[in-house]
Amino acid sequence: MTDRLRILHIGNGKAFKIKAIVDALVRRGHQVHMVPIPPIEQSWEGVRWHCLANPPVPGQAKVLARLYQVRRLALRLRPHVVHAHNAWGPGWYGAWTGRHPMLIHAYGGDLLPEQYRGRPALQRWLTSWSCRRADRIVVTGQHMIEAAGKLGIAPERVMLLPRGVDLERYRPGLDTSELRRRLGLQSASPIILSPRYQVDESLYNLDTVMDAFTLVRERFPQAVCLQLFDPLRESGRSSLAAAAEQRGLGAGYRLVPAVDNANMPLFYNMATAVVSVPSSDGFPVTVLEASACGAPLVVSRLPYCGEWFVDGENGLIVPVRDAQRLGQGLMELCTDAALRERLGSAGRRLVEQRADYRRCMDALEREYYRLLEDKGTGSLQEP
């Protein structure tokens, strides 16, 4: 099918993962609209941006008012497809449009009970309702299909699709000398990269990363741990900075603002090892990006790992919140160049075989057309 689609995306307007999908659809000639949640004034090249107005109502009533704003927008645009990114929040807006087909990209915090437990009952109901309204729930791991079932979502309505990686952008062998100079890391070695930038969320176990790094620092006084952070999460950044000071890490622990897809490959190429050890996760794209760049990984033993990683073959797998084992894994990588090369090469092959961005976007595009055919939408031409 060669008809171009009119697609309404709803989600975080600062999320690189959403932008990567949107960019692919723009390049394929589709007309792409974006509603950023929360509303922000910016734009992406080739995308028609719709920033919601700030309704003159208090508190949570703003959410209800904006739901109606998005519904009116959808009635005017008449998109062929509505695609919400995250069931929690954006999924509510997507379901409220009443348009079909409607897809929801669901992540760990949307479906995994250990992450959403404790949230307000109304929000849990809205998320479950939105998922049941969706024609397709897109997830990144097999365990997410099982979690979706607990919300009443039949397996045949769930699509398993990896977060693809642009293999031309994310690749090994990039020159990182300018980045080293800019960050003042010319003499730093080894460099541990912790790319999980949600620094105010305890489930990412950044304190465990810090404790493990102290073991590396004892052996390698010039070692540096680069912890990325979201600049909007100032309280989390401040807490980590204070914790590093208490541990006496000094300049060895560096908090660096998160960067975009143009610069992130340089960070992976510069890293001696990349660490991602949350207590719960859907499937972080950071581990695939690092693997695509040939950076050796240490990850926590979570359900998604069994689908992708084999300990000692394409990464090192450690127990959750075990700083001693994590430190040992990092030390292995810091001291064994042959191990780093073997794991890095195997990681690159893994992504080439299973998570090529172009093939993943091909699959998503096909799913759009398949859902339209199933709905008997008819002509895709402009109204």
Image (cartoon, helix red, strand yellow):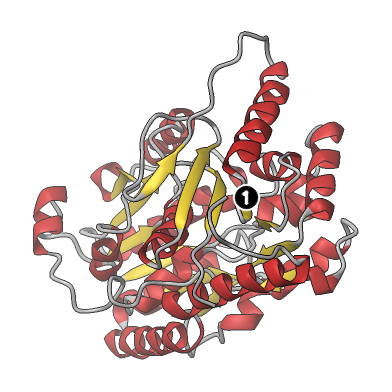
Q: Horizontally, is 184 left or right of 130 in the view?
A: left
The image quarter in which residue 139 lies: bottom right
Residue sitting nearer the eye, 329 or 248: 329
Would residue 176 be seen by someone viewing this image from the given angle?
yes
Residue sitting nearer the eye, 185 or 195: 195
Q: Is residue 173 above or below residue 6?
A: below
Q: Is residue 317 above or below residue 106?
A: below
- Residue at image location 57% in from the left, 71% down from the top: 364
User: Count of labels shown?
Assistant: 1
- Residue at image location 30% in from the left, 67% down from the top: 268
Percent of width and height locating residue 253: 32, 47
- Residue at image location 76% in from the left, 44% down from the top: 98
Read off the residue under disc 1: 84
Would residue 211 be seen by someone viewing this image from the given angle?
no
- Residue at image location 67% in from the left, 74% down from the top: 370
Percent of width and height locating residue 91: 69, 45
Residue sitting nearer the eye, 72 or 259: 72
Q: Is residue 176 above or below residue 184?
A: below
The image quarter in which residue 95 lies: top right
Q: Secondary structure at mark 1?
A: strand
- The quarter of the rendered structure image containing the N terminus is bottom right
Percent of width and height locating residue 137: 72, 62
Residue sitting nearer the eye, 173 or 226: 173
Q: Horizontally, is 333 left or right of 280 in the view?
A: left
Crowding at dot 1, Cα within 10 Å, few <14 / some 14-19 / many 20+, comes out as many
* Residue type at tag 1: Ala
